[in-house]
Image (cartoon, rainbow, N blue to C red):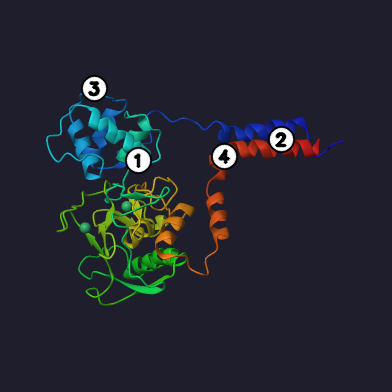
Amino acid sequence: MYPFFSYNTLFFLILSLLPHLFPARTAPGALIPGRLSPNATWNNFVNFIDAGKGANFSGMSELKKYFHRFGYLHVVDNFTDVFDDSFESAVVNYQRNLGLTVIGKLDEGTVTQIMSPRCGVSDEIIHVTKNYAYFSGEPRWGASAHMTLTYAFSGDNMINYLSFSDVSEAFRRSFSRWSTVIPVNFTEADDYSSADIKIGFYKGDHGDQEPFDGVLGVLAHAFSPENGRLHFDEAETWAVDFRSSESKVAVDLESVATHEIGHALGLAHSSVKGAIMYPSLSPRTKKVDLKIDDVEGIQALYGSNPNFHYSSLIESDVSSGWVVMNPMKWLIYLVVFVGVVL
Ligand SMILES: [Zn+2]
Ligand SMILES: [Zn+2]
């Protein structure tokens, strides 16, 4: 009567959906991205999992310095190893800003996030409209509705294991993602000194009070408008194609460039995990598509590119994660399907 559909088929369909409905849990800390990092200071933070108010751990002061660096603690010195009230409120703010469960103690998810490679720009949010945020005073480039900004690479501060054309092409794609949504064009210029946006790769202390820290940890940083400097940590293994870069700590140049250009245009960090302006990025991960949060944020500063349509963006936002993120949808579709067939 129903030759192409049977209870066996239903059984196997449900069986195949089980991994989506009940994702396997990994052992605590087993996949903490920061463990890939030779950054010993950040790696030691794994010892603080489950620490809460009143705890006293040797080395907690280093975590307080981390929180100070990224805008969550305002005391400049005298960091102790005690998990005190001000540190608890810093943890709460961090969890809120990073879209984590807000519990005020260092659960595994929070420590995992803290240890993940990230952008060096502070998370200190001055003006939050939705999830995206701006720098103090909401600076932007120029005042005209339409404009062209130039960018150039520092001849003295490039990496030599990627070809210049590969690097240039990766940045061209990154800039074009932003110009697709706002009425701003970007063109590469030869003259570094007069370019609006200046790009270079730097090692350790490079004269702007924001020293880089070696492999992973902080990956890059940029400055708010109209400064224009985009700095990348020379110590990273930058990649434009993971098929030709086997390193476990390879970092996708185009993904980080897209994020840093967002800063150069005026966006601060977002609390939306999928957004380009979320502060962290795991090694061997490509994340280059602007999400609705990024687009709303940048368009509120510059207006919309008249050729931009939200529909294409909404499709990409939905297709990028609904199978994993919304397994219940699978179940609803299955029930509807079974109902129709039976
Ligand atoms: Zn950033
Ligand atoms: Zn710098």
**Image x and y of residue 337, in percent:** 74, 39
Rendered location of residue 173, percent (x, y): 42, 66
Distance (Cα) linking label 4 and label 3: 38 Å
Residue 54 is labelled as: 3
Estimate how packed mark 2 is, as few (under 14), some (14 to 19) or many (20 or more) residues with alpha carbons within 10 Å. few
The answer to which of marks 2 and 4 sits earlier in the sequence is 4
Of residue 48 and residue 139, the one placed in the foreground of this image is: 139
Q: Secondary structure at mark 3?
A: loop
- Between disc 3 and disc 1, the foreground one is 3
Q: CA distance from mark 3 to mark 1?
A: 28 Å
State the SS at label 4: loop
- Closer to the eye: label 3 or 2: 3
The answer to whether the residues at label 2 and label 4 have Cβ atoms under 8 Å apart is no
Residue under circle 2?
335
- Taking the image in four quarters, ligand 2 sits in the one at bottom left
Q: Nearer the viewer, mark 1 or mark 2?
A: 2
- Among the two numbered marks 3 and 1 on one chain, the one whose residue lies closer to the N terminus: 1
Task: Mark 1 vs mark 4: give the one in front.
Answer: 4
As drawn, 68 above or below 87 = below
Q: Residue furthest left?
A: 78
Q: Quadrant of the C terminus?
A: top right
Residue 2, given in percent of the width and then of the height, sits at: 84, 37
| Mark 3 burial class by Cα count in 10 Å: few <14, some 14-19, many 20+ | few
For marks 4 and 3 on the same chain, the one whose residue lies earlier in the sequence: 3
Circle 1 is placed at which residue position?
A: 33
Q: Earlier in the sequence, mark 1 or mark 2?
A: 1
Q: Which residue is label 4 attached to?
A: 326
Residue kind at label 4, given as amino acid type:
Asn
